[in-house]
Amino acid sequence: MQIKFLKSKNLILIIVFLVTTTFLPLFYVWAQYVNSDQIALEINQLQQDINSKKNEIADIEAQISRYQIAIRNKQNEKASLANQMEIIDDQISKTELEVLRIQEQINQINLEIKLNQENIDLNNSKIEKIKNQIAEFIRTINRQDDKTYLEVMVSYDTLSQFFNEITYLESLETDLKLSLDKIKDLKAEMEANQAELTNKQARLVEIKQELSEKKQDLQATQNTKNYLLEQTKRDEYRYQQLLNEEKAAYEKMNNEIAYLERTIREKMANSGQLGDISKSGMIWPVSSQYITAYFHDPDYPYRHIFEHPAIDIRAKQGEVIKAAASGYVARAKDGGMGYSYIMIVHDNGISTVYGHVSSILVEEDTYVVQGQTIGLVGGTPGTPGAGRLTTGPHLHFEVRLSGIPVNPLNYLSY
């Protein structure tokens, strides 16, 4: 019985040896191939999902374009309360679609990030396989390198077998070089995937901020609609009266600015106290650089009253306004519950205007330096300094050249 037990024990050891030296390495190689195949399938599915998401985004953009066309067509029609409500409703629908588009873009970027990671994992898997092959190549070559040519020759029955072995070893060395080159290529591809992954992650942060801004735009437009309905009591006569009053107020302000522009420059001629914009450039007057309405913006909701002579910069109610450049405070107009603004005259025929100011913190006939606090942001409907056709909290920022509005983006530094 003891002899039988020993034989059984030896048999078990032999089986264990065979499994660990033969089947486990084979299983490891097989598992690597299965893992690579699984990753490849996942990559293929991700690519299909990304393409599907791109198609969805394209459909949303087509809908946005249709609303864009509808808005511009309505802006060319006769100004009426009903027409203005339709424009605002279309703008709300358009912004809702823009919010949806950004959400889908976030989903797409998340898929692309996952795709990049899968590509990195796949390349890692390929590299591991090639490393195992290289290890086997090296072991085979080393086994032969330990012998002299004479020892190798006498181990073969014929010269033909010997030369076949030499050819085989040369082939192994060629395969080894190719494998090393392949690893180099895969690592370069991995580095590119990693760089793209980093860029996608940075873009994700940016686009999430954009989503937040668009949601604020949507809320501001809805507030504008409600405030306009409240002001007019849904009455067309009151709406026309409001338009006429705002047109008159804008023309008065425009004439006032043009007059001040001319008289202040005559007064300050050759004083050298206006600051040289050509040297310092202009800084952004608020912390944000998010623009809600551009210069002469075709989507400006009150374009039928006047071309938008400024850029509107998203800012919180009560946020600090800074002088974009050094200059002379020509006007600090407190409009009470109407429109309040600050005008600063600079050198080279340039002046800046800051509108929808909730609080004025400078005095007329004084000098300010670039970056100095001059007031606080307003624009929330029904608050001091906002005016009656405001579109929510923001800074209305104008740049004028010889009294004529020009695009501020041509002067602001990024």
Image (cartoon, helix red, strand yellow):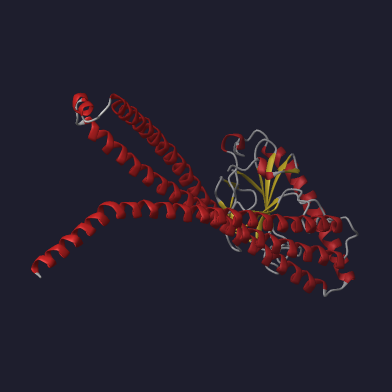
The image quadrant that residue 141 belongs to is top left
**x and y percentages locating residue 184 in the rendered image:** 41, 36
Q: Quadrant of residue 215?
A: bottom right
Q: Quadrant of residue 171?
A: top left
Is residue 400 depicted above or below 228 in this figure?
A: above
Left or right side of 147 for 343: right
Give the quarter of the figure containing the C terminus. top right
Is residue 54 positioned above or below 195 on the image? below
Depth check: give the residue in front, 288 or 249: 288
Who is closer to the viewer here, 128 or 85?
128
Q: Is residue 375 visible?
A: no
Along the horizontal axis of the image, is 293 left or right of 149?
Answer: right
Residue 356, given in percent of the width and then of the height, sits at 68, 59
Residue at horizontal 84 percent and vertical 74 percent from the top = 234
Query: Residue at 25% across / 29% down in the picture?
Result: 157
Q: Residue 77: x, y in percent?
A: 90, 58
Measured as percent of width and height from the top left, residue 334 is found at 69, 60
Is 67 displayed left or right of 52 in the figure? right
